[in-house]
Amino acid sequence: MSTSRPRPSFPAKLGKTAATAATSASIVSATSSKKILKPAATRLGKTEVPVRAEGLGLDSQVVRHKMVLKLQEQGITDPRVILAMGRIERHRFLDSALVNQAYEDTSLPIGYGQTISKPGVVSRMMELLLQAPSMLKKPSTQGQAKLGRILEIGTGCGYQAALLGQIASEVYSMERVRGLHDKARENLRPLSLPNVHLLLGDGMVGYPKGAPYAAIISAAGGDALPQAWLDQLALYGRLVAPMVAHGTQQALLVVDHTPQGFVHTVLEAVHFVPLKSGLA
C-alpha cells in the first residue's frame, strides 16, 4: 500500500527515542481470533524460475532453483516470493564454514547469538505480507504489484532485507546489535539495492519517521507486541511477527489494520530468537 507521506532522506538517521516509553499490546488468544490464511495465489499455479547454466557450485542458479522447488512443495505459491527466493543468493550472507548448508531449509548461526531463518519460514512470512488487505484490494495486479514501504525488525545478516527489497518499493530494516548491522551493510553493499535502508536502533520503538508502513515484519519474538509497531502500521497494512502464544511456545502472529480496528490471527508454531530492547 503506497502512502502519500514523503519518505525520509537516505541515509536515514534515528532521532532520540525513549525505548522505555513504548507500551505493549497483549496477544489475542488463538481460540478467539484464529482463522486459516490460505495462500492467495494458489490459482496461479507453479511459477517457473528461469534457470541458466551460469556460475559454479553455490553461485549456480541451479542450486537456488532446487531450493525454490522445495519451497513450492511446501506450499509457497506467490510468484513474487518465488522469484525473490531464486534471485537472492543466501550463501553470500553466511560465514564460509556454513556456505555448504546455505540452501538447506534450516536456520544457521550468524554470530552474536543470532541466526538466519529457514528459507521456508522466510518465504512463508513474505507471502503472508503479500496477502495484506491493501494488496487483495487490487485483484487486477495480484501476483505482480509490490508492497509499499516495509519496516523490518531485526536485520541480522541482511538476507531477509534483500528479499524484502524484491517485493516492496522501500524497506527500512532495523538492527540493535552494532556488529550485525555492520555485517549486513557489508553483505548488502555488492547488491546495490537503493530501496533497502539499514538503521542501527531499537526495533521495539520502530522508526516513526518512515511511518506509516504498508507492512511490518519481525525476525524476533516476544511476549507482546510493542504498541509502537501498531501505531506505525498503515490502515489496511499487515504486521507479521513471531509472538509467545502459550507458555514459551512461539507462533506466527498476523495483525491486519482495518477500519474497525486491529484483527489478530495466530498461525503455526515457529521458533525465533527473543525480542529485546536497547542497543548492543
Image (tube, rainbow, N blue to C red):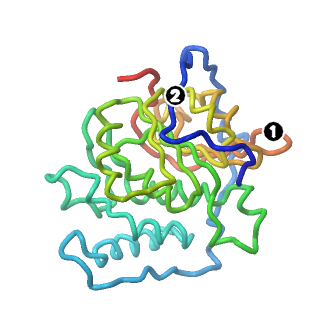
The residue lying toward the viewer, choosing from 183 and 91, is 183
Of mark 1 and mark 2, the one earlier in the sequence is 2
Task: Give x and y (percent) for residue 34.
Answer: 68, 47
How far is mark 1 from mark 2, CA to CA? 29 Å
- The kind of residue on which mark 2 rests is Leu
Residue hosting label 2: 14
The residue shown at (68%, 44%) is 6
Q: What kind of element bears circle 1?
A: strand
Up the image or down, 139 lies above or below 25; here it is: below
Task: Give x and y (percent) for residue 99.
Answer: 20, 58
Asked if marks 1 and 2 touch (Cβ < 8 Å), the reply is no
Q: What kind of element bears circle 2?
A: loop
The residue shown at (37%, 48%) is 158
The residue lying toward the viewer, choosing from 4 and 177, is 4
Q: How crowded is mark 2: few (under 14 residues within 10 Å), some or many (20 or more)?
A: some
The residue shown at (26%, 81%) is 54
Observer able to see residue 251: no
- The kind of residue on which mark 1 rests is Gly
Q: Which mark is residue 261?
A: 1
Q: Residue furthest front?
A: 9
